[in-house]
Amino acid sequence: MAVNLKKLAGQGSPLAPGHRLCSGCAAPTVAKQALLAAGKPAVVVQPTGCLEISSVVFPYSAWRTPYYHNAFENAAAVASGIEAALKARRRRGDLPADLDVAIITIGGDGGTYDIGFQALSGALERGHRILHICYDNGAYMNTGIQRSGATPFGAWTTTSHVGQALKGKPERRKDLTAIVAGHNPAYVAQASPHNFRDFMRKVKKAVDADGPSFINVIAPCWRGWRFPEEETIEVARLAVDTCYWPLLEVQDGKWTLNYVPRKKKPLADWLRKQGRFSHFFEPGNEWMLEHLQAEVDRQWEELLTRAGVER
Amino acid sequence: MPRIVGLTGDGAAAEAMRQIDPDVVAAYPITPQTEIVERFAEFVAEGLVNTEFVAVESEHSALSACCGAAAAGARAITCTSSQGLALMHEILYIAAGNRLPMVLTNVNRTLSAPLNIHCDHSDSMGSRDSGWIQLYCENVQEVYDTVIQAVRIAEHPEVNLPVMLNLDGFVISHSMQPVELMDDAAVKEFVGPFRPVVDLLDFQNPIALGALVAPEFQFEHKYAQWRAMDSARGVIGEVGREFGEGTGRHYGLLDPYRLDDAAVVVVVMGSAAGTSRAVVDELRSSGVRAGLLRVRAFRPFPADEITAALEGREAVAVLDRAGTQGGEGGPLFTEVRAALYTRGVSLPVLGYIYGLGGRDVPPASLRRVFEHVRRAAATGKVDRAVNYLDLRGWK
């Protein structure tokens, strides 16, 4: 499906202006692109997080579609119940038998990789027709930049400080996209808001898939990553160009790379833009850059093999 | 025509669920509730219900899925016990705060530690302030009847709150008793169709549920919830009466037994009421004016009704199948005493904690409780407010 920008631009934003997210935040961009692409009635479920607390502040809501926030760790379970209700009510004749609804959970990395993982894994295994979109900003930004399972190695956060004894987060991040793919759902993808055509095509594919689907979207947070707020989209692009955040799809066990840069940019190009990695460039810490570059290289090579890309 | 069959408490709950034929059941197995979810899964497999059965990966997700279902206009039911209810704890408050009607059958089992699968009320008492209506059943028949009534109570437009009905683990859940069942059609008619207040699948009227609320609105939200809980006091009686008209089995907030002229009274919830009745009869036949007040609704707490029932008695013992760890006596005792005090009723009230972790409550033990109540009646004094029934080493 090609994305018809002209048509979509005429539809109006599914997310009303006036929400309370930071200027330069990637999350509302991700949400808007996703809902525009869905192309059918959508119910949005959110775990607790930045996008949730900033978009639905009583008595206001920025969502022009039905919306439910219940708790932090259970968005996928709540969505499972909504999907069950939809099926039961269609069967009972209470709703049209052909009513097609996109049930979309939109969570941050905390509500997806960490506290929300059990509910997500359960929903994927049970095969509910739900799309979970993770806007991955690599830390608990809502509570003030604490490390999560998505925080990259070495990144500074307020629970992985840079000091004499420790230099940011000592551990590597989880490869959640691969973990989700291990559930063999109907559709899995990784995307970035800078390449909205790719992302929106994936959303459409996901909401039309006959089963659970998952899209992991990089969502740079200038407050947490420490870069100028107008560079969000550029920082997302660099994550892809450095192969830190490959654009990919997994369907029927087949891995597809949607973008292979002609020349992979050095990871330092992306890291240097972000204050959370500034200690990587201090004397004595050269090993950190080497270590993370090696990690990204290894994962990229693995992906090329998995996707059967000729070198 | 109604028919009488032999069922366990779990079996009766499952049978009521089959007849209600809810839109969504989301549940997770846990002893001693497991039979409910197993039986219901059989009904699903046999095509006897239209229900979407969501076999979740945890109780936390069971209740979360029920919240999603109820918010999406579905009649939802779940069931659990003990650790499962504790795992649901966070979401219990959300279901109530979001004003989502649903039914939860809780098979009372003690909370760890120590690990023990047997009955006491520590699990549901831990949820007593979560905003759920709580009903406690005495026997298998009442379990069956209450599951059906709970749907109506929860969905009543003035209530719109979740209902938790409780039955004693093993004592009721696993004991086979004769149960009079209603016709499927009669149950369908009694519960009627679900008319949801909120509906996430109404795309003409999109709503946002679960908003962030600032301090200037929080209190009012909670107050509206309390008012709904207050309304439930009347609705429980109303639904119980209507149920009685059709079945001959009437239900209310309280269930008094030989109370009219009783001088010494035991107040209790759950299956221990059955043994208490037998002991009351025994004492009556030996000339003691003994009576029983069984509390069926713990939330909303029927303070006025309990006071009216106990006023003028010589002495009372309140039996709790849970303690409060640091409070003065069990939760029922504490609240009964407070209700009496507030209403200017002064009489000796003894608190008894009993039956923890499935410890049996034989008639001999209840006789000793009545003995103690009679001593208090004779002296007009409470020698000890908090007592532990059949606790080894306690004097």
Image (spheres, rainbow, N blue to C red):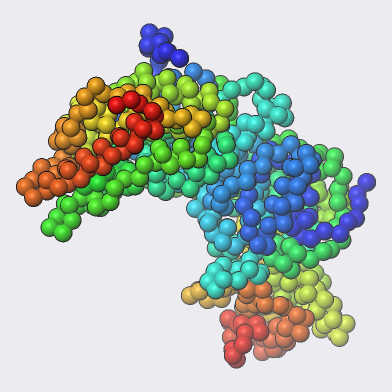
Would residue B236 appear left or right of B200 to someone viewing this image?
A: right
Residue sitting at 77 percent across and 45 percent down? B43
Task: Report x, y in % for residue A150.
Answer: 33, 43
Q: Quadrant of residue A10?
A: top left
Task: Report x, y in % for residue B333.
Answer: 61, 72
In the image, is residue B104 above or below residue B276? above
In the image, is residue A178 above or below residue B261? above
Task: Report x, y in % for residue A166.
Answer: 18, 56
Residue sitting at 27 percent across and 28 percent down? A240
Towards the viewer: B170 or B125: B170
Residue B204, visible in the rendered structure: yes
In the image, is residue B209 above or below residue B387? above
Q: Residue furthest top?
A: A6
Towards the viewer: A78 or B115: B115
Q: Quadrant of residue B280?
A: bottom right
Residue B99, visible in the rendered structure: no
Residue sitting at 65 percent across and 58 percent down? B106
Task: Report x, y in % for residue A155.
Answer: 22, 45
Q: Residue furthest left?
A: A283
In the image, is residue B6 above or below residue B103? below
Would residue B368 appear left or right of B244 to someone viewing this image?
A: left
Q: Quadrant of the C terminus of chain B?
A: bottom right
Badge count: 0
Q: Residue furthest front?
A: A311
Towards the viewer: A56 or B318: A56
Residue sitting at 75 percent across and 51 percent down? B39
